[in-house]
Image (spheres, rainbow, N blue to C red):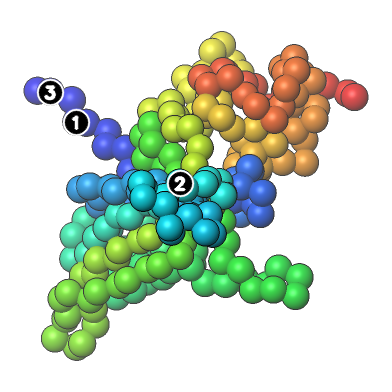
Amino acid sequence: MPEAVNLEKAELRQLDANFENEIEQDTWTKVQFNPETMKVTYANQLKTPEGAGDQTGPAARQFVGAGTTKLTLQLWFDVSAPVPEGMSKETDVRKLTQKVAYYITPKEDGDKLVPPAVRFIWGSFQFDGIMEGLEESLEYFSPEGRPLRANMTLNLSQQRITKFTFRDARGSASAPALGSRPLAQAPGGGSLQGMAAAFGKGADWQSIAAANNIENPRLLQAGALIDLNARRRL
């Protein structure tokens, strides 16, 4: 009999204000059903110079900004269907969708209110940005009036156009143990500070870097195996 396939689930993770480190792991949430499609849109910021309208040919346009990148996708949730491991069984679907809505809810940042930065990951795909739009549709109700099924359309954006980020398909999940010391695999483009914080060891990142002989903790090599339990006196 063929072995069951371990299906990778997409996940939303909170980032710090600099879009560098993954923080507050208790706010992370995995989707119930992976999206069928995702749409990524790129746009440069262009401006037509003043006084160019009297030219006979096409007016020249100038690049005036870093551009924007947007990600649009749709997620489904259904409490009448089996839920993935780690997701609680609920009788009201909004108990599940509220974890996604968290990322569009503004939080206090000094004297301002801003939504939390979010990282969407699924296998080798990664997108960092701000959730600028969220639409929730309730599709099916119990006889008591409880919503049981919902779909959510997410619109994420970042104020720049960057090179594609390719993650290892296993992300930052722990790799098989070598000997008696469990190792974790570094995600592409990640930092040791963010990786240590994701495992609840953010305060020890400097000693972890020293023990693993990591010269540049701000930029880890994708797939590098790191002993997060190692310590060295600084």
Amino acid under label 1? Ala
* Quarter of the image that includes the C terminus: top right
Instruction: Give how far across and how far down residue 14 sits, in percent.
Output: 55, 53
Q: Nearer the viewer, mark 2 or mark 3?
A: 2
The kind of secondary structure element at disc 1 is: loop
Q: Residue at x 19, y 88 (%)?
A: 144
Amino acid under label 3? Pro
Mark 2 vs mark 1, CA separation in Å: 58 Å
On screen, residue 136 versus residue 17, left or right, reads: left
Q: Which mark is residue 60?
A: 2
Instruction: Give how far across and how far down residue 97 sits, in percent.
Output: 36, 67
Tell me which numbered mark, 2 or 3, is placed earlier along the sequence.
3
Looking at the picture, tell me which residue is in the foreground, 67 or 127: 67
Q: Which residue occupies the extreme bottom position in the image?
A: 144
Name which quarter of the figure residue 80 lies in.
Answer: bottom left
Amino acid under label 2? Ala
Asked if the residue at tag 3 contacts the one at tag 2, i.e. Cβ–Cβ closer than 8 Å, the answer is: no
Name which quarter of the figure residue 198 lies in.
Answer: top right
Instruction: Give how far across and how far down residue 22 sits, in percent.
Output: 59, 45
| Residue for badge 1 | 4
The kind of secondary structure element at disc 2 is: loop
Q: Which residue occupies the extreme right position in the image?
A: 234
Vertical order, 199 against 39 (above or below): above
The kind of secondary structure element at disc 3 is: loop
- Circle 2 packing at 10 Å, graded few (<14), some (14-19), many (20+), is few
Looking at the picture, tell me which residue is in the foreground, 3 or 205: 205
* Quarter of the image that includes the N terminus: top left
Asked if the residue at tag 3 contacts the one at tag 1, i.e. Cβ–Cβ closer than 8 Å, the answer is: yes
Q: Residue at x 43, y 39 (%)?
A: 126
